[in-house]
Image (cartoon, rainbow, N blue to C red):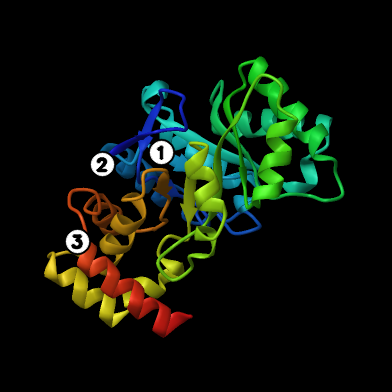
Amino acid sequence: MKLKELNQTGIKIPSIGMGTWGIGGGLTPDYSKDEEFIQLLITGLKLGLTLIDTAEMYGAGHTEELVGEAIKNFPREKIFIITKVLPENLRFKDLIKAAEQSLKRLKTPYIDLYLIHAPNPKIPLKESMEAMEKLKEEGLIKFIGVSNFKVVQMEEAQKYLKNSYLVANQVEYNLFYRRIERDILPYCEKRNITVIAYSPLARGLIPKDEFIQKVALKYNKTASQLALNWLIKKPKVIAIPKSSKVERLKEFIGATDWELSKEDEEKILKYVILRYN
């Protein structure tokens, strides 16, 4: 697995991790496939997908519980856990409590990277960032990040951090949705902020695209592998695809051992502009 430095922390993390939305439920818990999902996560970890992204929102906390079960027999320092606090929990005391509850569900003494899931204009960002920094000072989280933040919101969040800095912004980014290239990606690249790309396969649209499939076949790869390869080729970008099948996890691993040519990349981007924009 190709590793990348998280911001300028000296910490190396996998360029492809495991997303967990829908594992253990959507907005409510689903216990029907618990053992299957735990084994899926364990297999992914064994394959080298040692970065797991989750959130208190997923399965109303149950997804975190499944992650906690999956990681319990692995050396904690070998796994990088990202989780996110809901926008409605961004008051100081609520945020602290949310983090403590996530830690309990994850059965871990610390969260590697804690993200604000999305901005909440009704709650002062200053209050939220003070709580995040408090958690970091107490060792409950190692790094602070955000999700779905615009440039102006990232700048404001950083302004309120006294002894820390934002290391990541998790945003939607894929071949078919490149809006962050206008401002967020250049901003993050300039400041060494890691971009965590969610929905890297455009919610299943990319794997089905015949043109992308055709180009990928030239490299003896799948459309999914091509799409992930294109993302992680960018120095500050990592991707968190999600799948409920082991075969797909193995497929994701195959996105890291080759490189798309500049010529083919240009062909693909021209096609995408004509077809999807």
Residue underneath mark 2: 47
Q: Report the mark closest to the observer, 1 or 2.
A: 1
Q: Is residue 169 above or below residue 101?
A: below
Residue 83 visible? The answer is yes
**Residue at point 45%, 81% (across, down):** 276
Residue underneath mark 1: 51
Marks 3/2: CA–CA distance: 26 Å
Report the amino acid beneath label 1.
Leu
Marks 3/1: CA–CA distance: 27 Å
Check whether the beta carbons of the residues at disc 3 and disc 2 lie within 8 A of each other.
no
Question: Reading the chain from its start, which is encountered first: label 3 or label 2?
Answer: 2
**Residue at point 41%, 55% (across, down):** 241
Residue 194 visible? The answer is no
Report the amino acid beneath label 2.
Leu
Question: Reading the chain from its start, which is encountered first: label 3 or label 1?
Answer: 1
Where disc 1 sits, the SS reads strand
Q: Is residue 187 above or below residue 273?
A: above
Q: Report the mark closest to the observer, 3 or 2.
A: 3
Dot label at residue 261: 3
Q: Is residue 151 above or below residue 73?
A: below
- Horizontal and vertical percent position of residue 203: 46, 68
Q: Residues within 10 Å of mark 2 (few under 14, many from 20)?
A: some
Is 96 placed left or right of 174 in the picture?
right
**Residue at point 21%, 60% (across, down):** 260
* The N terminus sits in image quarter: top left
Q: Report the mark closest to the observer, 3 or 1.
A: 3
- Horizontal and vertical percent position of residue 72: 43, 28
State the residue lying farthest toward the bottom.
Answer: 275
Is 38 placed left or right of 217 in the picture?
right
Where disc 3 sits, the SS reads loop
Give the quarter of the image for residue 107. top right
The residue nearer to you, when weighing 114 against 172, is: 172
